[in-house]
Image (cartoon, rainbow, N blue to C red):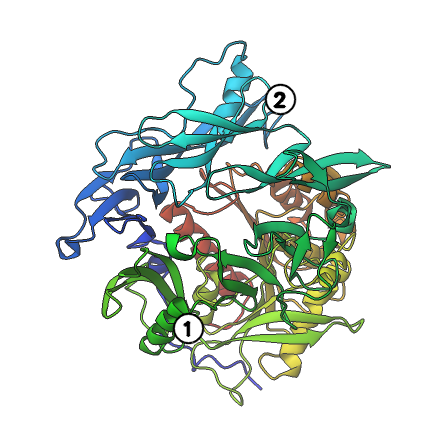
């Protein structure tokens, strides 16, 4: 039986996946007066420009457009209250870190500086957001560099009932710890709310006034770390330890206090202390007890969030919740919001409708739509009756160019059930000739995939060219149950990789592909999995593609994450089969690529040395991608280069049949 490719639709052009979105990062001001977003710059279509629209005159297009600067390039935007706009930009930076952040301890590191700016809706003046107006005394030059790279301040809470103030987090120059302030958007004045430390952080603020209601303390205990949650006693003004909320971090129980029930005074807690999946539990801080039964649970997936009203009429009431299913599903219990979604859904058949924001009277509702075949688009519902489409992120991609997507599961060789996302080739149906296939493991590995449009462009690139793609949610995946998450500990290149081989076997058993026509491609941890496949035998794969891989477990120390606790906790689980130590067993053709500004998995430590170790044993290629960081967003030229590398290697070097 041959490999069928006649069913593949006209492939999506690489340029159409690589070019800058036509519209992105759109948000609406709380008063409904302005929209803010990013569009391609009129000066250079490969760079973004900050745009502001007048909601009363949308037909005229953006009222103000500010192109990216010569060095700083816009990558995000957000509409605040008080006619203020938050803009996020970054630029390339090369210098000595001296131990600050991710990168080299000695010598120069190529990385990025990311900054947040405040401006008005008129975009006449930009200033660094929430910056400290007084000079930092006693701060060394190295510390100043650390603050520049880490970002000195960030928005924490919008405080919907206050017309001018928000909560911000600001990094202290002397302690390198974060303090929390009320910040006045109009005059820049601040009031201190909370002094942070290495062991203490705020967990929950009162969104009415900014008061800290819950804080977290983390301390080393017997070779482990213990997290204690302390809740404010309104009668005494003191924080009290809540023993039922105390956990050892190595157990990886999730205990997230997300709100207060005004009627009972009990706290809403998202936790998996009672079940494999996260549930919503009510907790009484007076009696120090959880309610006997969950307030909300789903039998198949975790509850990932509660949605609280920010309208004055029913402020702080729960109006919905989010189920962490194949894609995040928001379920509204508020009758108005529920009715809005129910009314919009028929207008976008087969697509997910997601409300982004709305005015207090619901006269203006900003929402998005998307599915696996349709890139995200922004829309407005005006006066509950008129639908206005603002635009698609990629309007040049037409329906029918990608294949059918479904959430599936298969049994691993030891019986564990492994969830996965299956994307069939465009036009392929059951009974057609087997198609070439790609096993695409996600990064992390403490992460997960979702169904819907793949913003990386990898899945539409492949399915529009006749490949089937399966994305296994292998053991070690976070967000699909604690059992699956813990099962990946110390299984790098072992059972975690077995799950990927078993995904390939399942594709064959379903008649989707056949032996000898399957490749593995992954990025970050997925890149490690591809490198590991190169030295594992027997292998179901014909070739491997590894983007920004970990290749040397012996050199993967605690510098691979910018989150201190994650470095400590996840670091001890990173054990298993070391591909670099087994490079002599390489037997698959492999393509490796990485950016020269990747400080997470530096190519000089991982991808390039592995390439040097195997290039005389197997057909191997390595590509440096100029100025590319580890994580997206990437420049369009980097997307063009990487997508072309993937496509050409599969077709020419691997010999998988495709369009």
Question: Which mark is drawn over residue 402?
Answer: 1
From this viewpoint, which residue is outermost toward the front?
Answer: 235
Please state if 61 lies on the left or on the right of 110 as rendered: left
Please name the residue shown 72% across and 36% down the image: 218
Residue 624 to residue 453: above or below: above
Question: Which mark is drawn over residue 305?
Answer: none
Measuring from the top left, give residue 102's x and y in whole percent: 59, 33
- Give the class, few, some or many, for how many residues have Cα within 10 Å of label 1's Cα (few <14, many ≥20): many
Q: Are marks 1 and 2 in contact (CB under 8 Å)?
A: no
Q: Nearer the viewer, residue 462 or 153?
A: 153
- Look at the image and tell me whether residue 426 can be seen: yes
Q: CA distance from mark 1 to mark 2?
A: 47 Å
> Which residue bears the numbered disc 2?
106
From this viewpoint, which residue is outermost toward the right?
Answer: 222
Quadrant location of residue 72?
A: top left
Measuring from the top left, give residue 208's x and y in whole percent: 46, 43
Please state if 60 lies on the left or on the right of 621 as rendered: left
Element at label 1 = loop
Please state if 343 lies on the left or on the right of 632 as rendered: left
- Look at the image and tell me whether residue 524 can be seen: no
- Give the class, few, some or many, for how many residues have Cα within 10 Å of label 2's Cα (few <14, many ≥20): few
Measuring from the top left, give residue 273's x and y in whole percent: 74, 57
**Quadrant location of the N terminus?**
bottom right
Element at label 2 = loop
N-terminal-most mark, 1 or 2:
2
Quadrant location of residue 117?
A: top left
Q: Nearer the viewer, residue 617 or 470?
A: 470
Residue 324 to residue 598: above or below: below
Quadrant location of residue 8?
A: bottom left
Residue 402 to residue 328: above or below: below
Measuring from the top left, give residue 629's x and y in whole percent: 49, 40
Please state if 612 lies on the left or on the right of 250 as rendered: left
């Amino acid at each position: 039986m041959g490999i069928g490719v006649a069913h593949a639709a006209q492939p999506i052009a690489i340029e159409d996946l690589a070019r800058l979105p036509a519209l992105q990062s759109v948000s609406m001001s709380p008063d409904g007066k302005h929209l803010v977003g990013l569009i391609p710059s009129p000066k250079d279509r490969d760079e973004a420009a900050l745009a502001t629209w007048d909601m009363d005159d949308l037909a005229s297009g953006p009222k103000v457009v500010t192109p990216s600067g010569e060095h700083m390039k816009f990558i995000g935007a957000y509409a605040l209250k008080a006619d203020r706009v938050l803009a996020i930009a970054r630029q390339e930076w090369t210098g000595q870190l001296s131990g600050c952040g991710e990168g080299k301890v000695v010598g120069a590191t190529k990385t990025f500086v990311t900054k947040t700016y405040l401006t008005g809706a008129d975009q006449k003046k930009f200033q660094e957001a929430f910056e400290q107006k007084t000079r930092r005394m006693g701060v060394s030059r190295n510390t100043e560099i650390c603050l520049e790279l880490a970002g000195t301040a960030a928005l924490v809470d919008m405080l919907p009932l206050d017309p001018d103030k928000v909560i911000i987090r600001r990094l202290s120059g002397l302690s390198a710890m974060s303090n929390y302030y009320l910040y006045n958007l109009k005059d820049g004045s601040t009031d201190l709310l909370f002094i942070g430390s290495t062991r203490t952080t705020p967990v929950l603020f009162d969104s009415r006034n900014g008061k800290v209601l819950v804080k977290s303390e983390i301390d080393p205990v017997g070779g482990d770390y213990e997290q204690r949650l302390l809740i404010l006693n309104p009668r005494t003004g003191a924080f009290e330890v809540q023993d039922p909320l105390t956990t050892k971090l190595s157990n990886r129980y999730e205990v997230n206090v997300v709100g207060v029930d005004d009627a009972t005074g009990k706290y809403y807690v998202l936790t998996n202390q009672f079940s494999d999946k996260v549930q919503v539990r009510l907790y009484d801080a007076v009696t120090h007890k959880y309610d006997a039964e969950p307030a909300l649970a789903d039998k198949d997936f975790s509850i990932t969030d509660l949605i609280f009203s920010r309208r004055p009429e029913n402020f702080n009431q729960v109006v919905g919740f989010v189920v962490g299913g194949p894609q995040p599903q928001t379920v509204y219990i508020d009758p108005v919001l529920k009715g809005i979604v129910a009314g919009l859904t028929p207008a976008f058949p087969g697509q997910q409708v997601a409300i982004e924001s709305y005015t207090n009277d619901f006269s203006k509702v900003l929402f998005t739509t998307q599915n696996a075949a349709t890139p995200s688009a922004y829309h407005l519902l005006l006066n509950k009756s008129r639908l206005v489409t603002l635009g698609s992120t990629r309007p040049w991609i037409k329906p029918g160019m990608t294949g059918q997507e479904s959430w599936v599961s298969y049994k691993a060789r030891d019986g564990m059930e492994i969830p996965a996302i299956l994307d069939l080739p465009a036009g392929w149906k059951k009974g057609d000739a087997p198609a070439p296939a790609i096993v695409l493991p996600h990064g992390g590995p403490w992460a997960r995939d979702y169904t819907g449009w793949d913003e990386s462009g990898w899945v539409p690139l492949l399915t529009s060219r006749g490949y089937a793609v399966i994305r296994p949610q292998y053991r070690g995946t976070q967000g699909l149950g604690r059992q699956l998450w813990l099962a990946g500990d110390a299984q790098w290149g072992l059972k975690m990789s077995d799950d990927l081989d078993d995904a390939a076997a399942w594709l064959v058993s379903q008649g989707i592909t056949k032996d000898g026509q399957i490749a593995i491609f992954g990025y970050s941890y997925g890149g490690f999995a591809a490198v590991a496949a190169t030295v594992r035998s027997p292998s179901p794969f014909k070739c491997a593609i590894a983007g920004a891989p970990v290749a040397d477990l012996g050199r993967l120390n605690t510098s691979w994450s910018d989150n201190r606790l994650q470095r400590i906790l996840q670091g001890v689980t990173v054990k298993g089969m070391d591909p670099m130590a087994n490079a002599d067993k390489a037997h698959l053709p492999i393509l490796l690529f990485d950016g020269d500004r990747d400080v997470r998995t530096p190519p000089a430590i991982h991808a390039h040395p592995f390439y040097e170790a195997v290039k005389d044993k197997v057909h191997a290629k390595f590509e440096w991608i100029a100025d590319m960081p580890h994580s997206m967003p990437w420049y369009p030229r980097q997307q063009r280069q990487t997508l072309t590398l993937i496509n050409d290697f599969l077709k020419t070097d691997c010999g998988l049949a495709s369009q």
